[in-house]
Image (spheres, helix red, strand yellow):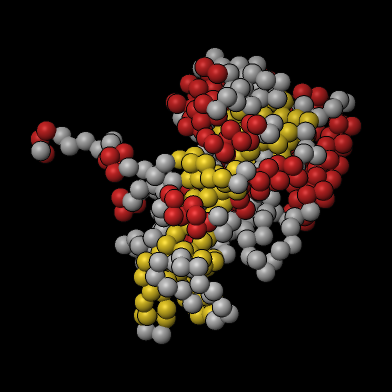
Amino acid sequence: MCQGVAEQFGTPVWLYDRATIEARITELQSFDVVRYAQKANSNLGLLSLMRKHGVVVDAVSAGEIVRALRVGFSPREKVSGIVFTADLFDRDALDLVRIHRIPVNIGSPDMIAQLAEAGIQVPLTVRVNPGFGHGHSRKTNTGGTLSKHGVWHKQLKDTIKVGKEKGLPISGLHMHIGSGSDFHHLSQVCGAMVEAAKLVGSDLHSISAGGGLPIPYRKDQLERIDVAAYFKLWDEARKQIEAEVGHPVALEVEPGRYLVAESGYLIAQLRSIKKVGNRLFYLIDAGFNDLVRPAFYGSWHHISVIPADGRDLGSARVNAIVAGPLCESGDVFTQEEGGFVVHRELPVAKVGDYVVLHDAGAYGAAMSSNYNSRRLAPEVLWSNGKPLLIRERQSFDHLLALDKIPVELS
């Protein structure tokens, strides 16, 4: 599959497996609402697949609102197809919320006043910072005093009051403390949600468990999160809240990475093998402009080698550093948080072989850039035994299209 896609579409290339995404959606069907955090991967083809399976979406920017509207999500359904979640409004986002009457999940008290000043009446929920956080990296911890996200829990009562005064009562609560949260932290979040719900009272009609469900990036750590246990904790919290407010409360979950990460592969070609002192480098044609997670977070991605000539790779292994083509020392896929470069035990490869970075469906293409004036790679969905192109490789003309040379400089 990977080699065929590489030969047909060139490298580097993103490949997603439709069946894997559909399996992850099925695993979360015990929740009343599965709301995809499209920041993980907002390709229109993947958003269309989500919609086909009854998944709704979260948008964190005006651009993500436009993407959701483009594929047919409607904010006017009983369960809104789009919710805008942010800590502030920019002008574009506020205009789209007004035009399309998109429900808002606010992360700052100022947003209520800005909605009121603009004469916007939409369903309102609050993202609460419970005062603590957790994440697989300091950069993915979204709770506590060092996080910009959410309304501080001690300000929630005043925020609810202001909402009522402005004619924008709070109808839902959202609480997410970071990616990779374990069950100890999760139980704390559930407890904090119950306490927050008491402040909202009978106006409360929905709670969101947020996202952050982990996946096993390391192949030697295959234990998966117990989704049934995850749901049970939240369902118990929901029942406590229902007893408090006196009516049913919908339970949402907001996965991003969990739905798409394991479906994705970044396929590159090995273009150079060289020794630097006693270290061996495998240099590939994908860089951190394509997949930035290792450089940004020190994230681990399993790496495999596919022989281009079909030979048997055998059992021989070498310690290799896998790096890209960018004019940047940090363009290394085998590094740990803090920028520490490490090697990976890999098969003996040849120039021309394919190198595959696994579990790259989330925060891969979505965070890619044109750094070093490199073109964005194509995206392909493997669906029912065949590859479907869902984003073309960026052309050089498109790369330069927005640049202008003033007459004075020509």
* Furthest residue in direction top, as rendered: 119
> As rendered, which of 78 and 103 lies closer to the eye?
78
User: Residue sitting at 57 percent across and 38 percent down?
Assistant: 46
> As rendered, which of 57 and 140 lies closer to the eye?
57
* Furthest residue in direction bottom, as rendered: 278
Residue 378, position as x, y percentages in the image:
44, 46
Residue 167, position as x, y percentages in the image:
65, 16
> As rendered, which of 8 and 205 lies closer to the eye?
8
Q: Quadrant of the C terminus?
A: top left
Q: Is residue 395 above or below residue 126?
A: below
Q: Quadrant of the N terminus?
A: bottom right
User: Residue sitting at 51 percent across and 45 percent down?
Assistant: 380
- Left or right side of 200 for 98: left
Residue 84, position as x, y percentages in the image:
58, 30
Q: Is residue 17 above or below residue 92?
A: below
User: Residue sitting at 36 percent across and 80 percent down?
Assistant: 276
Q: Is residue 184 above or below residue 321?
A: above
- Left or right side of 50 for 269: left
Residue 179, position as x, y percentages in the image:
64, 52
**Residue 45 visible in the shown view:** yes
